[in-house]
Image (spheres, coloured by chain):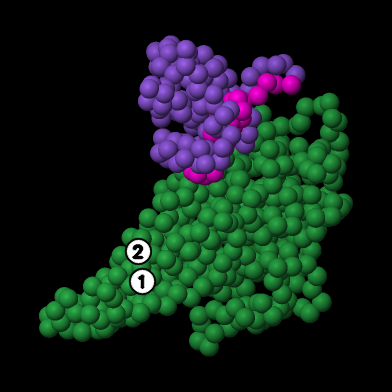
Chain colours: A green, B purple
Amino acid sequence: MTEPEDDQPIPRRLIDHAAVVARITERVDALAGISETDPAEERGVTRLAFTELERRAHDLAVDWARAAGATVHRDAIGNTILTYRPQEPYLLVGSHLDSVAGGGRYDGTIGVLAALEVAEAVQGHITQGLRVVVFSAEEGARFKQPCLGSSVAAGDLDAAGLGALYDSSTPPISALEAARELELMSEDFEPWVDPEKVTAFLEVHIEQGTVLESERLSIGVVDAIAGAARLGLTLRGRPEHSGATPMRIRADALAAASEIVLAVEEIGRRTRGGTATIGQLTVTPNGITTVPGKVVAGVDIRDTDKGQQEASVVAFRRATAEIVDRRGESHQRAITCEITPAGSRDPVMLSAWVRKALKDACEASRINYRIMPSGAGHDAAILAARVPAGMLFVASPNGLSHVPEEACNIEDVTLACGIMCDALLLLDKQSPGARR
Amino acid sequence: MRWYESELVLTRPGVLRRCAELLAHRIPENTDRIAARGSAAVAVATAVAVATDAQLLFGEADPDTGELRFVGDGFPGARVLLLEDIVESGGHAAMSVEALKAGGFSIIGVVALIDREGHGRNHLETQVGVTYEAEFRESELLP
């Protein structure tokens, strides 16, 4: 093992570019084959949280890591920990291998595959420990709450919390029951994301948006991960005959909802780092000749600033009340509204120390990049509350994600592997003193 | 000669708040960072950052070389708007633009709170080659 000296240049190009592109491409194909759907039918990848398929994907990663000399440990919630260097403290890299229903081949997957490449490449060049983690149950698709594996590892979620999350099968199965069917979530579980042991966590992920592509960049260095406030909105009017009911006496729940949709769009435009979306509307009775009597909407408000996220929620509540009140005054029949919180998570700033290492690694290799926030949640956001965490994005062609058409250029992933290698070497040299 | 003493007004929260509200409309949506140098300009830029959520870069002398550089969480190619409190000859802004370019940033333009109606506009637009806007002309404030 070579130990980097302070006055020596950092060893670069630990990544054999062509070989890594070929290996990651092959492994993406192998993992895409582990799906409820037949890959040949082009219906995307379905490898839901806490299923046998997710375990099979982890097992494949284990086989690859063992071949590179790693030892294997599975924690109680099914996070797979691959140890390349056993020392403590240790550098940690990884992502997840579960998917949404009918999702793409790259979300999470390329983060795990990049982590395997990076760990194998740098294991002989650093002084502290080195592990890869494959988190379980990152997607919220099955249990409506994301990042279950990382949350349990960080101590933010316990068995009782998992027992309160249900999927939509008949009868519903809780996340705890699903985990125990896979012989996971034993009683004696201890959270392990410990700042005394984990020097830093790094994750590579597809951007899932079009910012990088629109700027013709391959790489983004993430500075913040947006929080999200979700609210349910129910509007009740009167379902009446569309021909027989005069306009002036209607209580049209969909017309009110339409105004609220536009108000929410305007709220989202008010802040630089924020979004506000009504992406879900259920209209009842949903008939062409009936005034809409009831609308149930799902509201998603995100921001990289906690105060602004909360202010946007207040603005949504105020706008909704104002629209409903105004319609009640101008029409003879009032519409009632009910707003119920449906989950909230705070925005997270990622470590400036880790970001600096990623930036320095990009600049040393003359790789163009930009600093950008993540609108989507990631395991890195969970770990960032406990340990220094950083993320690299690779461009998402057409911004498509969570759909079968999700795409990713493996050349970009390989570029990210090289950056991660250099950043890990920098962090290894600088820690633990430099981050404090 | 008429003097506009920025330290008498740009140290007042109410003035800064109103300046920020006015200047916020001059920050293009695609701005990655706003840059400022000098205490009054930094005060205005900080107020604008709070109002718009745009991140800042600060100009300072490099402790080793003494050369002007802009520090902050920037990145090469970032689209940067330079904010000035007062522009007269444009020399101060021109020096900042050169330092930003040397730092690898892409310059959107220069926005000043007050234009003293000297040679600043001509200097910046024709010699430095950047777009230039000012919220007020001095003759509007001190007629």
- Residue B58 within the magenta-colored segment of the rendering: yes
Residue topped by disc 1:
A281
Camera-nearest residue between A35 and A185: A185
Q: Tag 1, which secondary structure? A: strand
Camera-nearest residue between B115 and A295: B115
Residue topped by disc 2:
A261
What chain does badge 2 belong to?
A
Give yes or no for contact between labels 2 and 1 (Cβ–Cβ under 8 Å).
yes
What chain does badge 1 belong to?
A
Residue furthest to the bottom: A171
Real-space CA distance between mark 2 and mark 1, rounded to the nearest whole angstrom: 10 Å
Residue furthest to the left: A243
Taking the spot 51% from the left edge, 27% from the top edge, the residue there is: B85
Residue B71 in the image, given as x and y percentages of width and height = 64, 30
Residue type, numbered disc 1: Leu
From this view, report whether residue B132 is shown above or below residue A257: above
